Image (tube, helix red, strand yellow):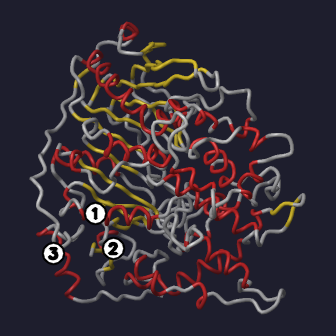
């Protein structure tokens, strides 16, 4: 049933007001000081590349060129299951900062790759990658320029950008002296490798890349963009704060800007679920903490209470702030009175889910990270895979001793080696008789000498505390970035199980303390139902790259970004009852999309951002 709650002239009047005064993207707080006008940057102009093989002779500080070869038009690559045909380009490979670590004896270097199209648009596209980086082995992380969102129609290379990507200073498969399960993260034992991974590689590679582009085209890039998601989104936000002169535009997908604290939240969740999980080999198998039926029940109850709050029953919850007040896990989800009862959650499961959604707390009840919104996307397989492990895997449930849950394989070693000072010995996680599971379950969140405090510890040869290395310094003050005329677009899905959208919202709200008109250079777009970076029951196909270029170079601020749903063949977690190509506007926070009261409910033109 459709419920229209916006059939008034007020909606239309409000839409016109937002259009003409441009103030609805984030009203300035009372008392915030005035800032100088934001400069308007010029439009980039392109050039034709005349060199490729000659670039092997290019030199720069700490650089060793490895190859430079012309790739003819028509090369086929598949990224995230989407096939692309690439234009002619020069593919360049090299290394910077090569060294042998005095700490662990391993060889390190910042490996990079660049794609330089024949017909260049005058722009640099820096692609920071997800996870802990450490690889250039698959197309998803190679220098083709992922434009983000679900099933993008093209790559940055196809659009004419010169693209650069790196492994952030370490080869995640190189250290064969440790167990395979921890090779991706054990580099954190080396202080320089940790700093380079956290942010330093950007400051090393970017100036070199701009000069190499000048050597290839006879001119440096007119405009430079950084576009990344997850850890790549974190790198974008850190770059805006640490290195504001390097980029003119940044797109940060669900940003892990509070990464060490988010890892604390993941460990907190694993420990919470272990309390209700069945035992396998004497250890809790968190993959069976909540069943599909459990998550379907919660998602359905969220929809019942929150779907129409934005004016329309359409399977999407746009008004997450109103939903926070409308939905109660305690009151709206039935509690089972017996083991045989269905369509309910046991009291233990409700308590556990509530503990997870509230986020980690110290012993005094103070928040260590943000809370999470209840969202219909919690029913999706991707949500359960991140939180609990892939119990739908053909090989059966994940066992506690060899967990497939990403909460274990990423966050356990990540906390041990990257986010703790001092880092743990590899034997603590994979020594005789010990596992990553044991480390996660034994991690002390609270109390005297708590393990969680190590994210703030200094010394031991590290330049900064892990928390300070991996997060933006003064995240609510981007004055230097703004004063250059640079712009930033941030987006985040409401059902993201990895990084809480509420954490990103609080960051954006805090910007108002130092930037009275924050929306003139930074805008946040919340994507209802979307999981981590893409997927889930959501309109998750959108183009943020065109939006950032138009904003930076033409002064066209994004008043809305059109997003579309994908068919089941592209997004297995979409709602199969939705028509293919349903569109919705993504609105700059704090606005949300509301139905006008007339017109098709399947097209974004029937909605207004208010």
| Crowdedness near tag 3: few (<14), some (14–19) or many (≥20) residues, C-alpha within 10 Å | few
179 relative position to 3: left or right = right
Rendered position, 295 above or below 144: below
Q: Residue 93's x, y, as percent?
A: 47, 19
Camera-side residue of 374 and 528: 374
Q: Residue 138's x, y, as percent?
A: 57, 33
| Image point (74%, 27%), residue name | 177
Q: CA distance from mark 3 to mark 1?
A: 14 Å
Task: State the residue position of label 2.
Answer: 593
| Crowdedness near tag 1: few (<14), some (14–19) or many (≥20) residues, C-alpha within 10 Å | many
Q: Earlier in the sequence, mark 3 or mark 1?
A: 3
149 relative position to 12: left or right = right
Marks 1 and 2 close (CB-CB < 8 Å) = yes
Q: Earlier in the sequence, mark 1 or mark 2?
A: 1
Task: State the residue position of label 1.
Answer: 560
Q: Residue lying farthest front?
A: 448
Report helix, strand or loop for mark 1.
loop
Q: Residue 224's x, y, as percent?
A: 28, 35
Res. 16 mark: 3
Report helix, strand or loop for mark 2.
strand
Marks 3 and 1 close (CB-CB < 8 Å) = no
Report helix, strand or loop for mark 3.
helix
| Image point (45%, 85%), residue name | 325
Q: Residue 122's x, y, as percent?
A: 24, 30
Q: How many numbered circles are shown?
A: 3
Q: CA distance from mark 2 to mark 3?
A: 14 Å
Camera-side residue of 142 and 270: 270
Camera-side residue of 233 and 546: 233
Q: Quadrant of residue 137?
A: top right
Q: CA distance from mark 1 to mark 2?
A: 9 Å
282 relative position to 606: left or right = right
Q: Earlier in the sequence, mark 2 or mark 3?
A: 3
């Amino acid at each position: 049933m459709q419920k229209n709650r916006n059939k008034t002239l007020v909606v239309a009047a409000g839409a016109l007001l937002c259009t003409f005064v441009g103030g609805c993207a984030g009203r300035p707080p009372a008392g915030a000081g005035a800032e100088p006008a934001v400069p308007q940057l010029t439009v980039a102009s392109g050039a034709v590349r005349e060199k490729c093989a000659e670039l092997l002779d290019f030199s720069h500080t700490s650089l060793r060129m490895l190859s430079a070869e012309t790739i003819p038009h028509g090369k086929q690559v598949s990224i995230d299951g989407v096939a692309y045909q690439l234009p002619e380009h020069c593919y360049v490979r090299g290394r910077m900062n090569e060294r042998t670590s005095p700490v662990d004896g391993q060889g390190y270097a910042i490996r990079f790759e660049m794609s330089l199209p024949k017909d260049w648009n005058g722009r640099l596209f820096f692609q920071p990658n997800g996870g802990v980086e450490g690889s250039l082995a698959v197309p998803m992380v190679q220098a083709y320029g992922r434009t983000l969102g679900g099933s993008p129609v093209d790559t940055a290379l196809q659009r004419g950008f010169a693209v650069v990507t790196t492994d952030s200073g370490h080869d995640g498969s190189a250290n064969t002296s440790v167990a395979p399960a921890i090779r991706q993260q054990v580099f954190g034992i080396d202080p320089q490798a940790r700093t380079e991974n956290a942010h330093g590689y950007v400051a090393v590679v970017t100036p070199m890349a701009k000069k190499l582009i000048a050597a290839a085209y006879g001119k440096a890039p007119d405009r430079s963009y950084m576009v990344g998601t997850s850890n790549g989104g974190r790198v974008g936000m850190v770059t805006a704060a640490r290195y504001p002169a390097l980029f003119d535009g940044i797109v940060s997908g669900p940003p892990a800007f509070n990464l060490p604290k988010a890892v604390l939240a993941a460990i907190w969740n694993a420990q919470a679920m272990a309390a209700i999980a069945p035992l396998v080999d004497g250890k809790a198998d968190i993959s069976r903490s909540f069943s599909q039926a459990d998550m379907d029940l919660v998602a359905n109850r969220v929809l019942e209470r929150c779907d129409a709050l934005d004016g329309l029953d359409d399977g999407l919850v746009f008004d997450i702030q109103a939903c926070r007040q409308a939905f109660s896990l305690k009151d709206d989800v039935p509690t089972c009175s017996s083991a045989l009862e269905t369509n309910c959650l046991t009291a233990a499961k409700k308590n556990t889910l509530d503990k997870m959604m509230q986020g980690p707390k110290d012993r005094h009840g103070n928040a260590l990270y943000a809370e999470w919104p209840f969202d219909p996307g919690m029913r999706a397989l991707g949500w359960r895979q991140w939180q609990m492990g892939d119990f739908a895997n053909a090989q059966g449930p994940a066992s506690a001793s060899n967990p497939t849950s990403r909460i274990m394989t990423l966050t356990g070693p990540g906390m041990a080696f990257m986010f703790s000072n001092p880092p743990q010995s590899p034997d603590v996680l994979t020594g005789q008789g010990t596992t990553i599971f044991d480390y996660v379950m034994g991690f002390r969140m609270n109390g005297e000498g708590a393990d969680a405090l190590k994210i703030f510890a200094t010394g031991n040869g590290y330049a900064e505390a892990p928390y300070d290395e991996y997060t933006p310094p003064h995240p609510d003050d981007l004055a230097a970035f703004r004063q250059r005329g640079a712009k930033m677009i941030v987006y985040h899905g409401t059902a993201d199980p990895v990084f809480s959208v509420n954490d990103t919202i609080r960051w954006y709200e805090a910007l108002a303390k130092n930037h009275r008109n924050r929306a003139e250079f930074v805008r946040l777009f919340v994507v209802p139902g979307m999981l981590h970076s893409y997927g889930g029951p959501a309109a998750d196909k959108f183009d943020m790259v065109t939006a950032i270029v138009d904003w930076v170079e033409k002064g066209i601020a994004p008043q809305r970004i059109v997003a579309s749903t994908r068919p089941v063949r592209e997004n297995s977690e979409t709602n199969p009852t939705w028509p293919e190509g349903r569109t919705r506007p993504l609105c700059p926070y704090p606005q949300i999309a509301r139905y006008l009261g007339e017109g098709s409910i399947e097209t974004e033109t029937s909605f207004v951002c208010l």
